Amino acid sequence: MRKSFLFLDTVANKVDAKGRVSLPADYRAIVKELSTEIVCYRSLTAPCIEGCTEDLLEKLATDIENSTDFFSETQDDLTNLIFGDAKRFSFDSTGRIMLTEKLLKHAEITDTAVFVGKGRKFQIWSEKNWEAEEARLREKIKLNRPSLKEENK
Amino acid sequence: MRKSFLFLDTVANKVDAKGRVSLPADYRAIVKELSTEIVCYRSLTAPCIEGCTEDLLEKLATDIENSTDFFSETQDDLTNLIFGDAKRFSFDSTGRIMLTEKLLKHAEITDTAVFVGKGRKFQIWSEKNWEAEEARLREKIKLNRPSLKEENK
DNA sequence: TTGATTCCCATAAAATACCATGTTATACCA
DNA sequence: TGGTATAACATGGTATTTTATGGGAATCAA
């Protein structure tokens, strides 16, 4: 019986005054299986937080090490942006993590965090921004796949 | 379950009157795991200090030894510069190191040291210089997004 | 001595672990 | 199938630990 390690589904949880949020139970199960912590960083392309398990970053570090030489300028710039921004988060016995001001601000999250599964990674959005993003994505699909048009209003 | 040894996140700590700085707790945990000391040297390309564990320099030395690369002579020179400049730093029971005048001056650090994770290495910047560097990097990414696609998968 | 470096202690603030409760979802049984 | 008991979960509050950082005493070198 093979277990799956994909982050799925969309879940909205409350952020309390201290910045604590419950990681969805499904996500916790995956993280516990692969590691003990998650890593979060500001998305480079959208107003949201991205999260993954640490071994994904490990892999990235190894790839970068092997693909360019020690003195490469590109390697330097990339590693600064990615590893400089990423931070480990461990969850307590009730499954909560404490997001930082920097991350919350980038995602414009105040009182509710929306977790969106993306397979190996997941994203955390504000309710408002996720609503807009989902609409945008569905609109984009409609344009690319005319055959679906009739089904959607 | 294997622990990860990546330097992550960006942390600003104070440099006190005696020149002491706390190494971020996360970094300390990694260093303790791999060794007891860190190694610091002046960056060859930026006004900042670079730091890593000694085994990374070991790896660098080995890579140069085995290199048949056309540019290995240049790399050899660069390596000499690093090894000539590098110095070991151990931290006290409260986790502080004492950086040298030479390093602080090169990085233009006076009262605050900003630690920036780079995966296997980390950097130490002045607040002012890091602010400018981060802005430069994010601007560069905006203009040159394609090269990031692989990292973002 | 003086000046600098290391070690140790003190403290405030921040991060983390733990406990309690209401609610929702799940399992179980008639 | 419907209803109830049970377990899992999100969430609020509190206690404990960790961490950064300041200051002082001890050690050492010039």
Image (cartoon, coloured by chain):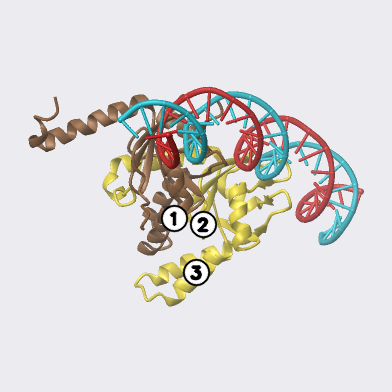
Chain colours: A brown, B yellow, C red, D cyan
Amino acid identity at mark 1: Asp
Residue at which label 1 appears:
A55
How busy is the neighbourhood of tag 3: few (under 14 within 10 Å), some, or many (20 plus)? few
Q: Same chain for labels 2 and 3? Say yes or no.
A: yes
- Residue visible at 55% across and 38% down? A94
Left or right placement of residue A142 versus residue A9 in this view: left
- The span from disc 1 to disc 2 (Cα, nearest Å) is 8 Å
Which of the two residues, A34 or B151, is positioned nearer the viewer here? A34
Residue B137 in the image: state x and y as whole percent: 39, 43
Kindly identify which residue carries mark 3. Answer: B59
Relative to the observer, which residue lies in front, A133 or D3?
D3
Seen at 17% across and 36% down, the residue is: A141
Identify the residue position indicated by label 2 in the image. Answer: B4
Question: Which amino acid, mark 2?
Answer: Ser
Q: Residue A118, relative to residue A127: is it above or below? A: below
How many badges with numbers are in the image?
3
Q: Quadrant of residue A139?
A: top left
Q: Residue B51 appears in which quarter of the rendering?
A: bottom right
Instruction: Name the foreground residue: A140 vs A150.
Output: A150
| SS of the residue under disc 3 | helix
The Cα atoms of the two marked residues, 3 and 1, are separated by 21 Å
Chain letter belonging to callout 2: B
Chain assignment, label 3: B
| Residue type of the residue flagged with mark 3 | Lys
Residue B57, position as x, y percentages in the image: 53, 66
Check the image and report above or below for B31 versus D4: below
Q: Earlier in the sequence, mark 2 or mark 3?
A: 2
Labelled pair 1, 2 in contact (Cβ < 8 Å): yes
Viewer-side label of 3, 1: 1
Q: Residue at x 70, y 46 (%)?
A: B19
Circles 3 and 1 in contact, beta carbons < 8 Å: no
